Every structure is written in C-alpha cells, then in structure tokens.
Image (cartoon, rainbow, N blue to C red):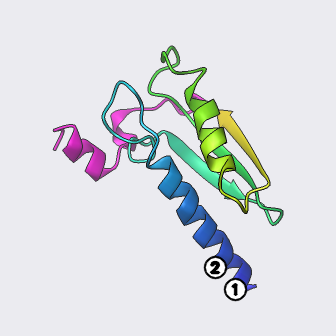
Amino acid sequence: MNEIMNEDLSLENRIISVLKKIYDPEIPVDIYELGLIYDIQISRKKEVKILMTLTTSNCPVADILPIEVKEKIQSIKEINNVNVILTFEPPWDRGFMSEEARLELGML
C-alpha cells in the first residue's frame, strides 16, 4: 500500500513540475504558483483529473490553456488519461497565489 502511495506522490510531483512550466501569457508566473490549479487527483489506473480555474471568466486563453494543460500532463508516460475541468467556483483571487508568485509580481 505504501508503495502505491509513494508512486502516486512521485507522479503528482512530476505533474506539478509540468504545471510549473505552463504560464499565463499575461502574467509572468506559472499557473501552479499563480493558484490556478485547485486540485490534482490520480486514480489507481493512472487517470488524472485536474480541477483548474482562470484569473477571470473572460480570460483570453480560456480556450487554449486547459488544452495545453491536458496535452502536457498527458505526455507523462505513466498517465493513461487526463481530464481537465475548468471551474470558476470559487472565483480566483490574488489570495490563491503562492508567496513566490506574489514576490515575483512585487506584491510582497
């Protein structure tokens, strides 16, 4: 059982690493540190569900960013399927950003 949990943790860390390479084109911070990723779930069958949001509901990359997330996460060889769910509940606000993101944007 611990082996499965460690395997999932390692896979989650690799997913996060990929997410940290995806940027909102209008903000010089990756989407993970920006707080756009609300949840990452990994099933036993290595199917991944990502719950994410955008900075606003009328974000110009609303059609592109979730597809980019799906494609880049799907490129991790162990993953069998990726489902990206876009939500606006709760709406994103600056409080979701990591300290690193706030520092990068001069908000600290």
Quick one: which residue is furthest to the bottom in this view?
Answer: 2
Residue 33 locus on image (x, y percent): 39, 47
Which range is magenta? 87-108
Q: Residue 93's image quarter?
A: top left
Mark 1 — residue?
2
- Which amino acid type is shown beneath numbered disc 1? Asn
> Callout 1: 10 Å neighbours few (<14), some, many (20+)?
few
Report the disc number at residue 72.
none
Q: Are marks 2 and 1 in contact (CB under 8 Å)?
A: yes
Q: Quadrant of the C terminus?
A: top left
- Which amino acid type is shown beneath numbered disc 2? Asn
Task: Judge from the rendering whether residue 97 lies leftward or rightward of residue 2; answer left or right.
Answer: left
Residue 19 falls inside the magenta stretch: no
Residue 52 locus on image (x, y percent): 58, 38
Residue 58 locus on image (x, y percent): 51, 14
Q: Nearer the viewer, residue 60 or 96?
A: 60
Taking the spot 48% from the left edge, 18% from the top edge, the residue there is 59
Residue 92 falls inside the magenta stretch: yes
> Callout 2: 10 Å neighbours few (<14), some, many (20+)?
few
Task: Judge from the rendering whether residue 49 lies leftward or rightward of residue 44; answer left or right.
Answer: left
> Marks 2 and 1, how far apart in space?
6 Å
Taking the spot 52% from the left edge, 18% from the top edge, the residue there is 57
Describe the element under mark 2 as helix, strand or loop. Answer: helix
Above or below for 34 versus 63: below
Describe the element under mark 1 as helix, strand or loop. Answer: helix
Above or below for 30 versus 79: above
Report the disc number at residue 6.
2
